[in-house]
Amino acid sequence: HFIEQSNGCHNNREKLGVYQLHAKNAADKNENAGVYIKLYDTDYFTHRIMRAVYYELRDEGHAISKLQNENLREINTYNYFTTSLGINLYLIMDSANGEDIIFSQRAAHAAHEESRFKYNSTVMEGVSQSDFDYAITSHKEISLWKSAERGLEEELGVTTDEIKIWLHDFFLQKDFFEIGVTASAKLTEDMATFEEYMRDLPAKDKDLEVARLVPVPFTTNKISQFICKHDMYEQGLYTLRMVAA
């Protein structure tokens, strides 16, 4: 696939895998909950190879396929499979009648042929070495906010000066055995609607990742109608539930 540049394998870029993930009920002096993550360097080729191995184990009924989100501690046992950490983000915008939530349809050249043209969150971006933030501490540390900002800019053309981002929770996507982070974002400009602002923005990876963007009124009825009519990514549905909550 990489030699032929097919099935989403356009180039072998660097990636970050998850070595350890530990949830803490009281992670800071104010006793806020948090998650500590230790990462390791890998690449997209290794990621795709480990996915292929996981599919074989899953089909054989191996214990790795029976992990539950309620007990993610066990995921550290299989850290050579957790070669990806992904940001799944919905963009919310003002509309004439309230707010719209933006769905994306994945492009023809996106990874995994079976998932092409499915609908998903607005942005689906993998955390990478581009997301180091040396302003946080003196040593290497990743900013998940920076990764979300990069996804918004590369896939949509939205710049960070115009946006506010919230991170919500972690989950395990069992079809691909990938750890995800749910997130939402909103433009800081008042009444910046999709038609006026978003439709024609240029973005570096837009043609590779996104076939079309669809604004849907952010109401229970309109969202329910949309997801009943369209084929959705499972992680897109889960992220939608977290953002709506």
Image (cartoon, rainbow, N blue to C red):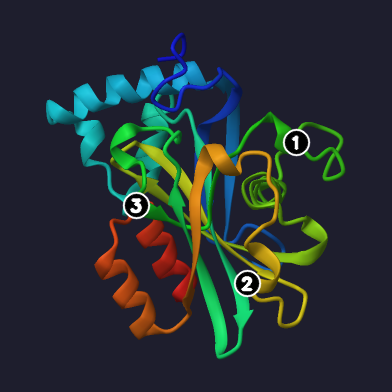
Q: Earlier in the sequence, mark 3 or mark 2?
A: 2
| 146 with respect to 113 (left or right) | right
Q: Pointer 3 and pointer 2: residues touching (CB < 8 Å)?
A: no
Instruction: Check disc 2 and report its element: helix, strand or loop.
Output: helix
Near mark 3 (Cα within 10 A), the count class, few <14, some 14-19 or many ≥20, is some
Near mark 1 (Cα within 10 A), the count class, few <14, some 14-19 or many ≥20, is some
User: In the rendered structure, which amino acid carries the disc numbered 3?
Assistant: Tyr
Q: Quadrant of the N terminus?
A: top left
Q: Earlier in the sequence, mark 2 or mark 1?
A: 1
Q: Residues under labels 3 and 2: Cα distance? A: 25 Å
- Residue labelled with disc 1: 132
What percent of the width, then of the height, locates residue 51?
34, 25
Instruction: Check disc 1 and report its element: helix, strand or loop.
Output: loop
Which residue is rendered at x = 44% and y = 31% of the image? 82
Q: Residues under labels 3 and 1: Cα distance? A: 28 Å
Instruction: Check disc 3 and report its element: helix, strand or loop.
Output: loop
User: In the rendered structure, which amino acid carries the disc numbered 1?
Assistant: Phe
Which image quadrant for residue 240?
bottom left
| 135 with respect to 2 (left or right) | right
- Residue labelled with disc 3: 233
Q: Nearer the viewer, residue 195 or 142?
A: 195
| Dot label at residue 195 | 2
- 134 lies above or below 180: above
Q: Earlier in the sequence, mark 3 or mark 1?
A: 1
| Dot label at residue 109 | none
